[in-house]
């Protein structure tokens, strides 16, 4: 009498490499604008819970991977468009009017604003009456926003409270833009 033994077979467990590949495809899909953030999060949760390769394949079926040539083209376009932005910033920066830093010996802060009593009077509608103050503290120049309506920025970053500034920095009071200079 021969007896046959049959053992139930289970599909092979997903490898970490397979799951990582699927997650990478999903990340690339959202980065390239093919998936919304919500869709990405939902698919990522499903990919982490998947038990079979077929489940991962279904989650990434609409995200075809680009070949090397397509990645090269996308990278080149990204680099060229970034270059244009940097070039415009550099061109504008060289044409900005200079704001001379006061002589450090004076010790008095330079008030900036529309007020006639300001050391630097800027008569522009985006500049507050008492907008900002530039002073020398501990061997450094400090620019302090004095609660202006349209804000003060240094190199494109809004000043909250005070910021250390140096020669060559781009400063904005409202929409009035200057390049800091010592001479």
Image (tube, helix red, strand yellow):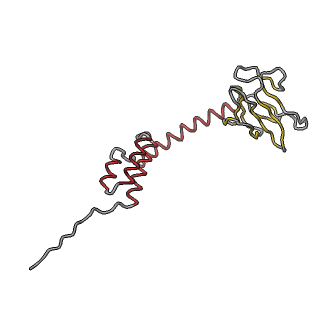
- Which residue is more in the foreground, 63 or 119? 119
Judge left or right: residue 126 versus residue 102.
left
Picture quarter containing residue 151? top right
Residue placed farthest to the bottom in the image?
Answer: 1
Identify the residue shown where x is 44% and y is 43%: 30
Q: Is residue 24 above or below residue 144?
A: below
Question: Quick one: 94 or 125, which is closer to the camera?
Answer: 125
The quadrant the C terminus occupies is: top right
Residue lying at the far left in this picture: please name it: 1
Considering depth in this image, is 122 or 96 the residue closer to the camera?
A: 122
Classify residue 55 as left or right of residue 96.
left
- Count of numbered circles on the image: 0
Q: Position of residue 3 (x, y in %)?
A: 13, 76
Vertical placement of 180 versus 40: above or below?
above
Q: Quadrant of the N terminus?
A: bottom left
| Residue 136 x %, y % | 84, 39
Q: Please name the residue shown 41% across and 41% down the image.
A: 35
- Residue 134, percent across and down? 80, 34
Q: Compared to 88, does 41 lie above or below?
A: below
Residue displayed at 44% across by 39% down: 33
Q: Residue at x 82, y 29 (%)?
A: 111
Q: Is residue 73 above or below residue 151?
A: below
Rendered location of residue 85, percent (x, y): 59, 35
| Quadrant position of residue 82 | top right
Side of 27 where 155 appears, left or right: right
């Amino acid at each position: 009498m021969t007896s046959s033994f049959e053992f139930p077979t289970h599909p092979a467990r997903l490898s970490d490499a397979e799951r990582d590949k699927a997650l990478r495809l999903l990340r690339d899909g959202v980065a390239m604008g093919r998936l919304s953030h919500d869709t990405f999060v939902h698919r990522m949760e499903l990919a982490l819970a998947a038990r079979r390769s077929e489940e991962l394949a279904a989650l990434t079926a609409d995200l075809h991977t680009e070949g090397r040539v397509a990645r090269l083209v996308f990278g080149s376009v990204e680099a060229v468009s970034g270059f244009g932005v940097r070039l415009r910033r550099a061109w504008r920066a060289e044409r900005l009017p200079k704001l001379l830093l006061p002589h450090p010996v004076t010790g008095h802060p330079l008030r900036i604003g529309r007020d006639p009593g300001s050391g630097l009077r800027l008569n522009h509608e985006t500049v507050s009456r008492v907008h900002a103050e530039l002073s020398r503290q501990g061997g450094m120049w400090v620019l302090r926003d004095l609660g202006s309506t349209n804000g003060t920025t240094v190199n494109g970053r809004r000043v909250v409270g005070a910021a250390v500034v140096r020669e060559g920095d781009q400063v904005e009071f409202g929409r009035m833009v200057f390049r800091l200079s010592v001479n």
